[in-house]
Image: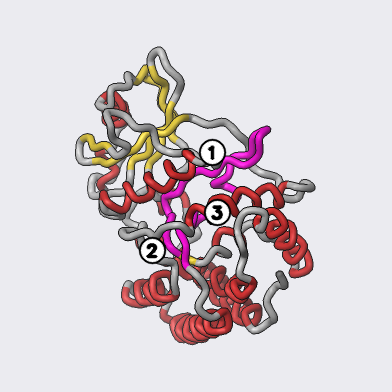
Amino acid sequence: MMDASHPYSALTPDCALDALDSTGLKADGRLLALNSYENRVYQMGVEDGLPVVIKFYRPGRWSDAAILEEHAYTIELAAREIPVVAPLELNAATLHAHAGFRFAVYPKQGGRMPEFDRSGTLQRMGRFLGRIHAVGAQARFAQRPALDIETFGIASRDFLRAGHWLPADLLAAWDSVVEHALQSVAHCFARAGAVRAIRLHGDCHAGNVLWTEAGPLFVDFDDSRMGPAVQDLWMLLSGERDEQQEQMNEILTGYEDFAEFDPRELHLVEALRTLRLLHYAAWLARRWDDPAFPAAFPWFNTQQYWQARILELREQIALMDEPPLAA
C-alpha cells in the first residue's frame, strides 16, 4: 500500500501516462519504471513513434529556473555534437507540468555500462569530458548551487546532527571524526588555492554513462552545478593509489586534447570524495520519508552503518594527509 503522506504516492501509472499524453505524444500503455530514487523515471511506449524516457522531478527540490538551466546546458552541449542526452522540446518547451508534477521527456537511448579497465576507454572518457568542460567554462550557472564545503560538508553535518540520526553511543566519535574530516577538507582546498569553478555534470559515475559503439553517452545532468573540473574526473578512479595514478594519467591524456587541466585540482580528489560521503549520508536521511528509500536502503541508519561511516571518514582523513596524485 502506498504511503499517502509522500507526494510521489499520487504519481500512479495512469497519472504518468496522462502526463505524456499532455505533451502531444500519445502513450501506448507500455510503461517500465527505471532505476532512480531522487526522481521518478519511466520508459514509455509511444503510438506510431519511438519509446521515450520521462523524468518526474522530485517536488520541492529544484526551482523551475534551475531545471531550465540544466536543460539549456545539455541542449548547448548537444548542439556542439557532444554526446549527451538532452530533453525533447515539445510544444516549444522542455519542462512540463501535469497533476502537480513537473517533468521532462527524453529520447530513449541504448548502451551498456562502460568498462573502464579496457584499454583506451578512460582516454576516450577524458576526451569527451574535456569537450564538456570546454563548453562548461564559457558561462556560469545563475540558479544552480555550487559544490563546496558549505553545501556538501557543513550542511550535511548539521542536518544529520540536528535530526538525531546518530546512535547515542556513537555520537561523540562521529562528531570528532566529522570535525577532523572537514578540517582536512579545508586544508586540501587551501593547498589547491583559487581553482576555477565551471559548469559540471556533477555526478559523473559509471551509472550515468552509456557506452555505445561511438563511445560514451552522458546522461542525467540532474546534479549539474558549479565546481572544480576534477569533480567529474575522480569518480572514474578505482583501486589502489598506483592504479588510480595510471587511470588519471589516461583520463588527462584525452582531457587535455580539448581543455586545460589545472594540476592544483588534484589536491581536491580525496577532499571531494569525503564531501560526497557526508552528502550521501545526509541525502539518505533527507529522503527517508519517501517509502522507496527504506525499501531500497534497509541498511541505512543501523548501528553497523554509522560504525562503517566513522571508519570510512578516518580512512579519508589519512588519505587527505598524503601527497596528491601527479598530473
Residue 285 got which mark? 2
Instruction: Please rate how many residues cluster around mark 1, counting C-alpha atoms within 10 Å: few if below 14, some from 14 to 19, many from 20.
Output: few
Q: Amino acid at mark 1?
A: Glu
The quarter in which the C terminus is drawn is bottom right
Instruction: Answer left or right for 155 relative to 252.
Output: left
| Rendered image: mark on residue 204 | 3
Q: Position of residue 240 (x, y in %)?
A: 75, 67
138, above or below 37, in the image: below
Query: Toward the viewer: 323 or 287?
Result: 323
SS label for mark 3 = loop
Label 1: element kind = loop
In the picture, residue 233 is in which quadrant?
bottom right
Q: Identify the residue position indicated by label 1 in the image.
A: 81
- The magenta segment is 197-226
x and y percentages locating residue 121 in the rendered image: 72, 47
Residue at (42% x, 41% y) in the render: 75
Quarter of the rendering containing residue 55: top left
